Image: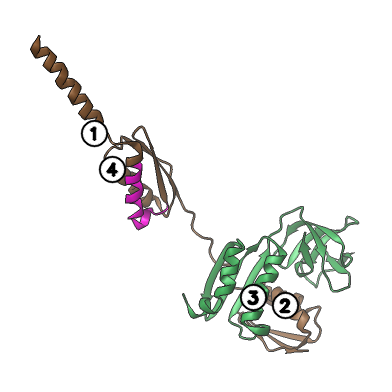
Amino acid sequence: MSALQDKYKELLDAATAADVSNLNVSEVNNVLHVSGEAASGETKDKLWDIYNKIDPDYRTGDLILDVNVAAGAGTKATVTTDSTNLNIRKGPGTDQPIVGKAAHGATVTLLSKANDQWWLIKNENGDEGYAYAQYLSPQ
Amino acid sequence: MKFSKNLIAVFFMASVLFFGCKPKDSDVQAKITEKFASMPELTGATASVSGGVATLSGEVKDDAARTLAESTAKDIKGVKSVTNNTTVTPPPPPPPAIATGTDLSKGVTDATKDFPAVKATVDNGVVTLTGTIKRSDLPKLMQSISSLNPAKINNQLTIK
């Protein structure tokens, strides 16, 4: 086990214990890359709490924790912006025109994932478009 | 007459001896299990024996290991035939590619859009963050950028 895997052992153990699927741990140029799909947002949050505990405020820059929440088409998700509306855009990017909004706390339906950042969703009015995944919590 | 009686007795004895020598399925199974456990390639394989037929199951690393499991089981005394139901473990998925180039720059722009006091630069896959952020927003930003899988994140943010 490398020094980095040793440093983040608690995190890797927690990921294994939480059954993170497709868990992949690799080391490239002294940065540990951990990727996979967590079954729930709680699992992801827990892993980030452990990361913050081992490396306060994520200062060292020796870990990329690329664990995302697994969510299939049809999954309902809550809009978890701070307080504002979530923009729904025509395409996956903030340079894309806004085609609709989803209110803070509203429920939207996941149609597909363009990538880990942008999900194609439908809001309660039936508006379809891409929203930033960081502000969506699968229910 | 006496001779034939003896002959019957001999046949009887022989048959008792013959059947007595036939190994019990459970013993054969234990022997195969023990043999598999001693071979590192076959630790994932299991065997069950019924009527001298050994059925192998479990996951092994490649086709060579499957063949080895079959020949190993065949060599055990008491095994009449082998049904090889072992499967080859699929290889683990390759690690996701580390992001560089325009996709990463665009992704970082999207991730920092809601944090106007944060400045981000991207150089050869390395994302450097400067400026200020609230501590409660830091995990959100770090998660967004990490999900792009850059080579490294240099977090030089001042935390308010």
Q: CA distance from mark 3 to mark 2?
A: 12 Å
Q: CA distance from mark 3 to mark 4?
A: 51 Å
Residue A53 image offset from top left, x and y in percent: 64, 80
**Which amino acid type corresponds to the residue marked 4 in the rendered image?**
Ile
Secondary-structure class at tag 2: helix
Q: Nearer the viewer, mark 2 or mark 4?
A: 4
Q: Does residue A88 appear to the left or right of A64 in the view shown?
A: right
- Chain identity of mark 3: A
Question: Please, what is the dominant secondary structure of the magenta stretch?
Answer: helix
Q: Does residue A34 appear to the left or right of A124 in the view shown?
A: left
Q: Which residue is mark 2?
A: B139
Q: Quadrant of the C terminus of chain A?
A: bottom right
Instruction: Report if residue B99 lies within the magenta region.
Output: no
Asked whether the residues under marks 4 and 1 belong to the same chain, the reply is yes
Q: Are marks 3 and 1 in contact (CB under 8 Å)?
A: no
Q: Does residue B147 appear to the left or right of A5 in the view shown?
A: right
User: What colour do you see for chain B?
Assistant: brown
Q: Are marks 1 and 2 in contact (CB under 8 Å)?
A: no
Q: Which residue is nearer to you in this view: B130 or B66? A: B66
| Relative height, residue B42 to residue B160 (above, below) | above
Q: Any idea which chain is the green one in this picture?
A: A
Q: CA distance from mark 1 to mark 2?
A: 70 Å
Magenta residues (range): B29-44
Q: Quadrant of residue A43?
A: bottom right
